[in-house]
Image (cartoon, rainbow, N blue to C red):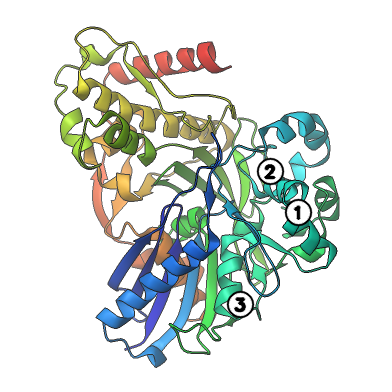
Amino acid sequence: MGFLLAIDQGTTGTTSLLIDAKTLKVIDKEKCDYRQIYPKPSWVEHDLEDIWKSVATSVTAILVRQKTDLKKIEGIGITNQRETTCAYDKKGNPLYHAIVWQDRRTSEFCEKNSSDYQNICRKKTGLPLDPYFSGTKMRWFLDNVPKIKAAAEKNDLCLSTVDTFLLYRLSAGKSYSTEPSNASRTMLMNLETFNWDDELIKFFGLSKSFLPEIKESFTHFGETKDVGFLPDGIPVLSILGDQQAALFGQACVNEGDIKCTYGTGAFLLLNTGSKLIHSQTGLLTTAAYSFRGQKAYALEGSAYIAGAAVQWLRDNLKSIKSSPEVEALAHEVKDLSQMENVLFLPFFTGIGTPYWNSHAKAAIVGLTRDTHNGHIARACLEGIALSVNDSVSSFKKDFTHLNDIRVDGGAAANDLLMQIQANFSQKTILRPQVIDTTAFGVAIGCLVGKGEVGIQDMGRYWKLEKELHPEKNSYYPQKKSLWDETIKRLYL
């Protein structure tokens, strides 16, 4: 039996999966969480050594538990939190904490440069100028961290997303590469060419020498060397940003296919095939993947907060002891008329699609004396679903044909949330048997990179677990109207 190793480096931890290379059955998995660092309000950082340790710990745990013959590992796939930005020297030593995608410290830079960016860069990148993306974080590194500025002057600086940092460490510094799904989130890659763009690099005051090479998504990126917990010579064959990996793992390889991943935030991707579409409704245009000279594009909607809203109920309001309990608590609401005016606006780190307001703050509105924890739990789930639906509504305006929505991520296991989503979006929700679709996507990507599986063969590996159909109820369009009106009144 041969194996594939999938490393899913996420926002709160790293999950490693050992997968049968022939059947693609998940044999074992291990998650290792690491600390979140909040130096100031709206600042979020990760220690790169914590990230690396979480990779080593999670991989080692499953290999020891399974008594795996390490020589039978045929390839490694990496998927990662995308816009989180790393600075390290050419020996792989971190020069500062990674700045996480949620971080808003560059809001002022974005506001000052927004008009110039719109004129020069927006069409090239498909992205608004927002603190979410990596380019502004790289600029902040150079402007504010003397050690990084000194490294730049000595030509001893690497600026990258997390995928590249992991590849660099796995290969003992021999491989310094990324691929389009990650590079397209930096605001430095030209969407038409899938190459770094000199004008974009100049706009952010950077140098191309700091950046990794952009390769195709499924290829030979390099081999393990001097890792310690893995033998030398295992090829890294697949790299995708987490949302594109989920798109791939959900077998969304045809035009009109949609997936939504419910994690810390909720992220939707709509496969537009070879069509590079510039959204007229606030969506992002992004690279889906590239292979053998073919470029695949997607439209993306982003809700910064999804599962994190449930965590807030658990950790701050103490209304539940564990996140899965929110479903039972929300089910205590038997009469939806009691919910008509209660809204949970989960904008703890600003609003993403389609409004892009980085200053927005969360709110619960419409409370009365008889409002109880069940109402707030239900409103929380509705707030997640309504945030996601804003992206679905934009998809419907920008693209003529939308297929059913395939869902994954931890919160996708919540049947009530998924039914609420189907009702607001009026789309059938499809949940697969394997909801670790990010890791599953790069595992299959390894086989694509080896030439053993074709992209159009993906569907045969996808298995349905549950299907939820939209219900007709006047409550949902009325609640959506209240949602729209409230956002305009409070945030726009």
Q: Which is more foreground, mark 2 or mark 3?
A: 3
Which mark is on residue 146?
1
Residue 270 place in picture, x, y as percent: 51, 46
Looking at the image, which is closer to me, 235 or 140?
A: 140
Q: Residues within 10 Å of mark 1 (few under 14, many from 20)?
A: few
Q: CA distance from mark 3 to mark 1?
A: 32 Å
* SS at circle 3: strand
* SS at circle 2: loop
Q: Residues within 10 Å of mark 3 (few under 14, many from 20)?
A: many
Residue 476 can be seen in this image: yes
Q: Earlier in the sequence, mark 1 or mark 2?
A: 2
Q: Give the residue pinned by disc 3.
A: 221
Q: Earlier in the sequence, mark 3 or mark 1?
A: 1
Amino acid carrying label 2: it is Gly
Q: CA distance from mark 2 to mark 3?
A: 26 Å
Locate residue 417: give its quadrant: top left
Amino acid carrying label 3: it is Phe
Q: Is residue 133 above or below residue 170?
A: above
Q: Give the residue pinned by disc 2.
A: 126
- Tell me the quarter of the image containing the N terminus: bottom left
Q: Which is more foreground, mark 3 or mark 1?
A: 1
Residue 205 place in picture, x, y as percent: 83, 49
Q: Residues within 10 Å of mark 2 (few under 14, many from 20)?
A: many
Amino acid carrying label 1: it is Pro
Q: CA distance from mark 1 to mark 2?
A: 32 Å
